[in-house]
Image (cartoon, helix red, strand yellow):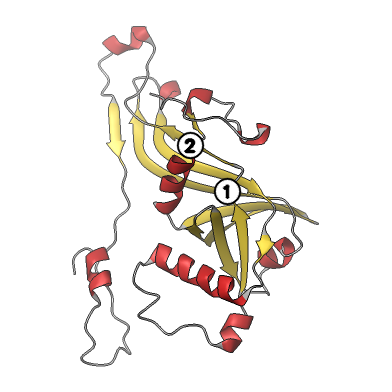
């Protein structure tokens, strides 16, 4: 089943061409999909060929932030403001059809095209680090020690505008060929969710330190 198309593609390269009715260009939907995750994949070209690497991210308004070490190849390459592509995807279900050909996935995905820009303003850079931290574990920024001068200098922050972004979403049951609906084969959706486990304390944690509420709320089995 396809989700009705929402909005219009701002540029030709973000237009969804394969099953276009699943394309969504509404910024609110794009933001919701981004905010539901914290791991993205960044694709770019370097001298020895194309690369795709995973990294954490955070969104603030119309800006997507990533960070890393100046020694990391991805950060070194993209400091040169080369074109890149960022993707985020959530698998919501395995779609089991009566025929193997029509097996699929229910998913929510976003693709962002752009040229990353290094964040050099000190205030924005610190804000970006907070955004990424809070996107992964809300509440952690105010609890843990902030980066010192050395750590701050050893961290690169890059930002992408979300001006060129589109979403693609699939929901619902399988779509079999009409003649296959009479087959004696189970069909439907196996939902897929991501859950947290029980917290595992650092062996060197001092006695008497209680689990912060924001962590106990996130963890299961605590």
Image mark for residue 162: 1
Label 2 vs 1, first from the N-terminus: 2
Name the mark on residue 26.
2
Q: Does 140 sit above or below residue 59?
A: below
Q: Which residue lies at the image location 27% right of the left edge and 64% below the top edge? A: 218
Q: Which mark is residue 42?
A: none
Q: Position of residue 199 (x, y in %)?
A: 26, 72
User: Residue 88: x and y, percent?
Assistant: 50, 48
Marks 2 & 1, CB-CB < 8 Å contact: no
Residue 178 appears in the picture as rendered? yes
**Residue 19 appears in the figure:** no
| Residue farthest to the right, as pictured | 47
182 and 90: which is toward the camera:
90
Image point (61%, 60%), residue name = 159
Going by the picture, which residue comes out furthest to the top?
A: 179
Neighbour tally class for label 1: few under 14, some 14-19, many 20 plus, Cα within 10 Å: some
Residue 138 rendering spot, x and y as whole percentages: 35, 67
Residue at 60% in and 88% down: 150
Secondary structure of the residue carrying tag 2 is loop
Whether residue 217 sits left or right of residue 51 in the image: it is: left
Residue 80 drawn above or below residue 103: below
- Graded by Cα atoms within 10 Å as few (under 14), some (14 to 19) or many (20 or more), the crowding at tag 2 reads some
Say which quarter of the image contains residue 211: bottom left
112 relative position to 219: left or right: right
Q: Describe residue 139's horizontal placement relative to residue 207 as left or right.
A: right
Quadrant where the N terminus lies? top left
Q: CA distance from mark 2 to mark 1?
A: 12 Å
Which image quadrant for residue 105? top left
Q: Position of residue 52 (x, y in %)?
A: 63, 53
How many numbered dots are placed on residues in this image?
A: 2
Give the structural element (helix, strand or loop) at label 1: loop
Depicted 139 relative to depicted 206: above or below = above
């Amino acid at each position: 089943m396809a989700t009705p198309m929402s909005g219009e593609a701002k540029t030709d390269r973000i237009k969804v061409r394969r099953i276009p009715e699943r394309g969504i260009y509404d910024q609110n939907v794009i933001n919701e999909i981004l905010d539901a995750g914290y791991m993205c994949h960044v694709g770019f070209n370097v001298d020895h060929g194309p690369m795709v690497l995973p990294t954490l991210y955070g969104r603030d308004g119309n800006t997507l932030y990533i960070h890393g070490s100046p020694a990391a190849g991805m950060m070194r390459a993209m400091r040169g403001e080369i074109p890149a592509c960022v993707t985020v995807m959530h698998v919501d279900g395995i779609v089991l059809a009566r025929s193997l050909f029509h097996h699929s996935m229910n998913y929510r995905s976003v693709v962002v095209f752009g040229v990353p820009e290094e964040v050099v303003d000190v205030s924005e850079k610190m804000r970006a680090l907070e955004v990424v931290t809070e996107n992964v574990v809300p509440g952690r920024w105010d609890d843990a020690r902030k980066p010192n001068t050395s750590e701050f200098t050893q961290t690169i922050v890059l930002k992408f505008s979300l001006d060129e972004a589109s979403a693609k979403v699939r929901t619902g049951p399988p779509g079999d060929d009409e003649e296959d609906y009479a087959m004696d084969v189970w069909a439907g959706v196996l939902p897929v969710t991501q859950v947290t486990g029980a917290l595992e304390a650092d062996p060197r944690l001092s006695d008497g330190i209680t689990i912060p509420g924001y962590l106990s709320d996130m963890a299961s089995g605590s």
